[in-house]
Image (cartoon, grey):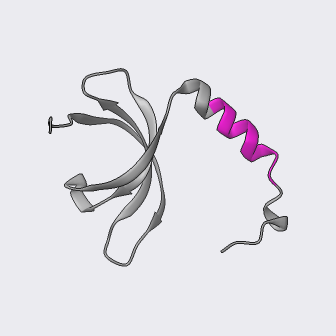
Amino acid sequence: MAEIKFEVTESLGVLSEGSKGWQKEINLISWNDRKPKVDIRDWAPEHEKMGKGVTLNKEELKKLKELLEGVDLEALEME
């Protein structure tokens, strides 16, 4: 399997931190020397390991923002 090359070009923030120090982060990441995309995933301390995540291009990010603006957080039944 080919090695995946990545570079965190900008950290946008941390959403949460687990008990083992892993953080769910939103970053701009360049995958395999391509143009950076918004990426949401869990990272081990120092970014030595990563969990599965979601990578969004600009149009997908705009659509997600639009969808989330319409969400009534008080009506959601979740943690």
Residue 65 percent across, percent down from the top left = 68, 39
Determine the image quadrant of residue 34: top left
Magenta stretch, main secondary structure class = helix
Q: Is 74 drawn above or below residue 53 in the view shown?
A: below
Which of the pair 59/12 is nearer the observer? Answer: 59
Residue 53 percent across, percent down from the top left = 42, 49
Q: Is residue 17 left or right of residue 71?
A: left
Q: Residue at x 60, y 31 (%)?
A: 60
**What is the quadrant of the N terminus in the image?**
top left
Q: Is residue 40 left or right of residue 76?
A: left
Membership of 63 in magenta stretch = yes
Residue 42 percent across, percent down from the top left = 38, 58
Q: Is 31 drawn above or below residue 69 in the view shown?
A: above
Residue 31 percent across, percent down from the top left = 30, 31
Residue at the outermost bottom position: 19
The total number of labels drawn is 0
Q: Is 21 drawn above or below residue 27 in the view shown?
A: below
Segment colored magenta: 62-71
**What is the quadrant of the C terminus in the image?**
bottom right
Which of the pair 66/51 is nearer the observer? Answer: 51
Q: Residue at x 82, y 46 (%)?
A: 70
Q: Is 51 drawn above or below residue 4 in the view shown?
A: below
Determine the image quadrant of residue 58: top right
Q: Is residue 58 left or right of residue 37?
A: right
Which of the pair 3/21 is nearer the observer? Answer: 3
Residue at the outermost front position: 1
Q: Residue at x 66, y 39 (%)?
A: 64
Membership of 34 in magenta stretch = no
